[in-house]
Amino acid sequence: MLSHLLIEVYIFVLAVFVGFQLISKVPSVLHTPLMSATNAIHGVILVGAIALASSVHGTLDVVIAVAAVFLATLNVVGGYVVTDRILGMFKTKSAERPTE
Amino acid sequence: MNTVLEVGYLLTAVLFIMGVMRLRSPATARSGNLTAASGMVIAFIVTVLRYHSYSWLLIGVTIIVGAFVGTYAAKKVRMTAMPQMVALFNGMGGGAASLISIGALHSSWSHGISTPGSSISALLTILIGSISFTGSLLAFIKLQELITGRPITFGAQKLLNGILLALAVVLGIAMAISGGSHDFLVLTIYVIISAVLGVLVVLPIGGADMPVVISLLNAFTGLAAAATGFLLTNNVLIIAGALVGASGTILTQAMSRAMNRPIQNILFGAFGKVAAGGGGGTVGDADGVVQTATVEDVATILAYSRNVVVVPGYGLAVARAQQEVRQLMEKLGQRGVTVRFGIHPVAGRMPGHMNVLLAEADVPYDSLFEMDAINPQFPQTDVVLVIGANDVTNPAARNQPGSPLYGMPILNVDQAQRVIVLKRSMNPGFAGIDNPLYINPKTSMLFGDAKASLTRLLRELDEV
């Protein structure tokens, strides 16, 4: 049991290091989409909400699980769509401008 | 079955990391976002394959409605309102993490299978997730200006925060040790305290400090997701949460460094009030003369220069003048004038916000330069056009040790040959600090609304 927790701590610590390495190389031009994209990534909490929904029975617990699924879905879908919209606006000089 | 789940989650984690890797350059960033999104789809599919003993109708409808509302909101939001939108989605994630832990804890209590270890993960998630949820909602309300964006403070605020946090810790320890269903009332009180803490943390934080708060709340939700991963022994949650936590932490640090204020100062200082006391009248002894310019003067100066750097501040976005700035850039470009943008990290209401606002107005991103890239260029720059920015150009940050801004990294616009400042009036900026740049002999002021001034400038340029 303890070794299991230890493995999870390993994963967490290593992922934090990877995160710091990756994120510190993102230029400030892209900080808004970065925040918005990572915001969508933590929406993966949706899988936890689904797992919970599958294991609960009482009315209160079901209500809690459904609310969690709803909030997490908003987070995931809204997060990715908004990030895609932001990034779609970043163009170079050579790129075609749709209007004008 | 579990193997499919674990392999799927591994693939998801790899796709998340690859997605973030591609966010390092504007050219690959959009595909990076799609990479991360495809990871999310895989995680969703393997999860539904593994866990499906719930009402399909109920969960299916919930997901479809959530997806519809999320897409609608994401498509509708204006780019100036992006900070509050991100705050809102972030709060949803925090709320979801908190609810999952409440549900899991309550369920394990009623089955008598809770362990102190899982209880601690759950209680930690509830605390962080609830703070993130209500804090983000309040940040949304403040940024949307449903209530005042100014700091709201009252006497014993810090004391109250401390007492509530201590109370939450005591209740948490009590629940972790006893671990029984009779604790449900205690759990409710614990959730309420956590939610109130979220409100109290964001309440005293004012408009210009919002980039820091949003970054911080983002990190909070990441940590809440990671803690949920420990609770549910779910590795993809741990990895994703760690990534987001790292990202939020780095951005928080970057923002507070760019504002020259330690994070505890932002969280507990209520900037507007502190600075007004310490900073007033720092240039009173200089007694310089403010030179005003006419639109004709500015048009002539710009038309006959070779190198122009535009320094935009949030005032530009408030005046909705991004399109005019882009037209100015094009018009000057036709005359052979090179126009670049020098962007301070805290220009806007979230990290990198100004870049997005300019990108929306079709300003190419290769014309946008970070502070460190543009600063060495100012001595070779003919004209700097400062539009709606104030404190981030204040040379007092470099040479007046008594100024509250002293030590803050700024754009060294005063090193250019000439400076033209478009400004509504001589009122000092958000921090309430005088700007010696305005009495520099190199500087000319063009007073008026940024959009109106730029429109007249565009017209005048045709006649030069």
Image: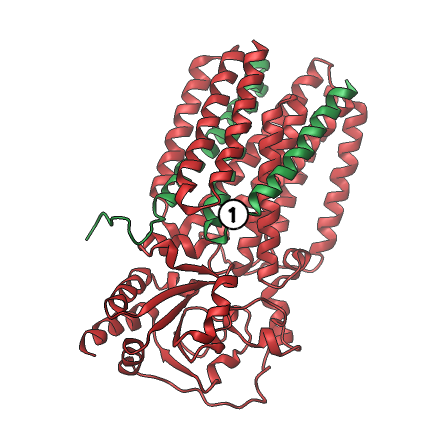
Chain colours: A green, B red
Residue A61 visible, this orientation: yes
User: Hey, what amino acid is under mark 1?
Assistant: Val
Q: Nearer the viewer, residue B346 or B38?
A: B38
The answer to whether residue B76 is left or right of residue B199 is: left
User: How far across and how far down the image is residue B98, in percent?
Assistant: 61, 32
Q: Chain of mark 1?
A: A
Left or right, B241 with reference to B428 = right
State whether residue B298 is above or below residue A88.
below
Question: Can you tell which quarter of the image residue A33 is in?
Answer: top left
Location of the N terminus of chain A by quadrant is top right
Counting from the top left corner in percent of width and height, residue B377 is at 46, 69
| Label 1: element kind | loop
Can you say whether B172 is above or below A63 in the image?
below
- The answer to which image quadrant residue B169 occupies is top right
Q: What residue is rendered at 63% in x and 29% in y?
A: B238
In this rendering, the count of numbered labels is 1
Measured as percent of width and height from the top left, residue B6 is found at: 58, 17
Could you say which is closer to the camera, residue B422 or residue B29?
A: B29
Assess disc 1: are there few (<14), some (14-19) or many (≥20) residues with their C-alpha within 10 Å of its C-alpha.
Answer: some
* Residue occupying image coordinates x 49% and y 77%: B415
Q: Position of residue B214 (x, y in %)?
A: 54, 49
Quadrant hosting residue A19: top right
Q: Is residue B203 left or right of residue B74?
A: right
Circle 1 residue: A26
Tell me if residue B301 comes above or below residue B56 in the rendering.
below
Residue at 30% from the left image edge and 65% from the top image edge: B329
Residue A62 appears in the figure: no
Q: Name the residue: 52% across, 62% down.
A: B372
